[in-house]
Amino acid sequence: MKGTLIALLQLVIVLIGVVALVFLIWFPLTEGRATNLDLISIYSDTFILYG
């Protein structure tokens, strides 16, 4: 029982991490200055990177 609970909690933490990573990659593509940029340009633009 205890091992199952630990595995479930680890799975939940990994899923939260994956969702956060996807959000951090997807979100800049939808906002203002970065709307027309590709993924490489977004993360190499110093203004966006600083923000």
Image (cartoon, rainbow, N blue to C red):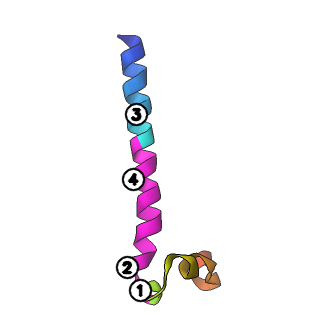
Q: Is residue 25 above or below residue 11?
A: below
Residue under label 1, please give it.
Answer: 35
What amino acid does circle 1 point to? Thr
Q: Where is residue 42, by image quadrant?
A: bottom right
- Image coordinates of residue 7 in percent, x first then y, are 41, 24
Q: Residues within 10 Å of mark 4 (few under 14, many from 20)?
A: few
**Who's the residue at 45% across and 75% down the image?**
28
Q: Quadrant of the N terminus?
A: top left
Q: Residues within 10 Å of mark 1 (few under 14, many from 20)?
A: few
Q: Nearer the viewer, residue 25 or 2?
A: 25
Q: Of the residues under marks 4 and 2, which one precedes in the sequence?
A: 4
What amino acid does circle 2 point to? Thr
- The boundaries of the magenta stretch are 15-32
Q: Quadrant of the C terminus?
A: bottom right
Residue under label 3, please give it.
Answer: 11
**Dot label at residue 30:** 2
- Image coordinates of residue 34 in percent, x first then y, are 47, 85
Q: CA distance from mark 3 to mark 1?
A: 33 Å
Q: CA distance from mark 3 to mark 4?
A: 12 Å
Q: Look at the numbered disc 3 and give the secondary structure of its residue.
A: helix
Q: Of the residues under marks 3 and 4, which one precedes in the sequence?
A: 3
- Image coordinates of residue 29 in percent, x first then y, are 42, 77
Give the left or right position of residue 19, taking residue 45 as reference.
left
Q: Is residue 40 above or below residue 23?
A: below
Whether residue 14 is visible: yes
Q: Of the residues under marks 3 and 2, which one precedes in the sequence?
A: 3
